[in-house]
Amino acid sequence: MPVDVNLVLSPADAANEQQVKRALAKQLGLKPELVSKYVITRKSIDARRGNIKVNLGVRVFKGAEQVKSNAPTFRYLNVTWSTPVAIVGAGPAGLFAALRLMELGYKPILIERGNAVSDRKRDIAKLSREHNLNLDSNYAFGEGGAGTFSDGKLYTRSKKRGDLSRILYNLHLHGANENILYEAHPHIGTNKLPGIIVNIRETIIANGGEVHFGKRVSRILTSNGKASGVELADGSTIDAAAVILATGHSARDIYTMLVEQGILIEAKPFAMGVRVEHPQELIDSIQYHGAKRNDFLPAASYSLVHQVEGRGVYSFCMCPGGFIVPAATEDGEVVVNGMSPSLRNSRFANSGMVVEIRLEDIPNFDPQNPLSGLNYQRWLEEQASIHGGKGFTAPAQRLADFVQGKTSSSLPKCSYHPGTNPSDLHKWLPADIATRLQQGFKEFGRKMNGFLTNEAQILGVESRTSSPVRIPRDPETLQHVQLNGLFPCGEGAGYAGGIVSSAVDGELIAESVARYLK
């Protein structure tokens, strides 16, 4: 029988197979040659006291034992002539809903407003270099959704919603590195994720599913009081036995469409703030207590949270060794986000720093208008554009200057390709956001000595952390509370946040669709 062992090793020893075998043999009282095979099941770094260690969970197979995998199996049926289900949006929620539907014997028809990955790369390059925004294909819209070109983090706290291992193993099956199966904070990297998304698309098509790019949905079709398909902006229609809405949190026209059709949606709390960028070397020094990072240590990260006047102020989507990218979906707005390549080898570290926004915090909040939060979000993005200057240039300020309410006469170098413009963010950000961020940064400076510095800068605005709208669904059937056959799903519907939780929700929705159709 295999044995599960916990090891605490130096980073160098944890990366050396022979050293791991020696440590296993010593702990088990065996000769090293009897430790024939092992599988890493968990890996995390402990740098809290300056003596950096790696915690490994290891499953050991002794002697002639065969390595047995706990990987789930995925059996996709040929669904060419099966009952069709329309899926609006080809992000993680939509893609994993499609995969699960094929296991259950239903035909997914994915409808994506943006372009396929290869064309989407060119659209994003034009945005960064020429300030030319494609309204339907950008960092938010297109094959794979917002996560495709903004990092590929797989960590989630939503561990009670479904089987997370199915998502990780399926990503590994489609090309992700094996380490996502055991790392404490798994990460694919924005340079690798596009290829994995393409492999998933090929799996869907090979088994009889359909994927349509450049198709914007303009209406939900109904028949006998049930969702029966979608109408597209070009006037064509797609008939389906059920409709899954997996549009992501930036598809504002979808929310407007639902309101115009009389389909119930509601405003919900969200968060907005800025993105902060430090030299990665500084974050390494803080987190590794002055120890110089080597080949056995990853670029250091952090997670920060503090309560200010009854509202959470917290880091979001921290990107070690990463870049800040333009995430706008409309002209006349500036939105920033972060990403990291798989090696996390940029000399910058960035993170969203946001403030919790409750409904009562929204200026002129109208309980009868479910788009009140969305309108506030859009207004702040327009302010960032006004203060950023030409194109998608972002307004920026040195971090310590922002906290002290001072003007930054110059700015440090920045990874944000469209460029930055010095701006007094403390003057034009809404007062409740600005003052809470200032207090939050002071506290983060106490928690991480050296964090609060003018070597760092903040860029505005980080406003797409989550959807300001929820599309309500029945907790038992997961259908829309008002329209049978319509299944709100993922981040855009207000039920997930990030790649893994969205993918899990996609699988749950697919199973609910199958129950509905039976």
Image: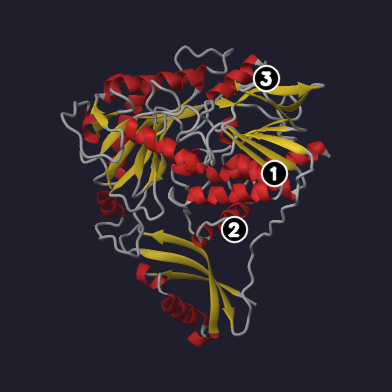
Q: CA distance from mark 2 to mark 1?
A: 19 Å
Q: Is residue 334 above or below residue 300?
A: above
Q: Is residue 462 above or below residue 165?
A: above
| Relative to 406, 17 lies left or right | right
Provide the secondary structure element on which disc 1 rests.
Answer: loop
Nearest to N terminus: mark 2 or mark 1: 2
Mark 1 packing: few (<14 Cα in 10 Å), some, or many (20+)? Answer: many
In this rendering, the label closer to the viewer, 3 or 2? 2
Disc assigned to residue 263? 3
Q: Are marks 2 and 1 in contact (CB under 8 Å)?
A: no
The total of numbered circles placed on residues is 3
For the C terminus, which image quadrant? top right
- Please state which amino acid type lies under the numbered disc 2: Leu
| Relative to 203, 79 lies left or right | right
- Please state which amino acid type lies under the numbered disc 1: Gly
| Relative to 225, 151 lies left or right | left
Provide the secondary structure element on which disc 3 rests.
Answer: loop
Disc assigned to residue 209? 1
Determine which residue is flagged by label 2: 173
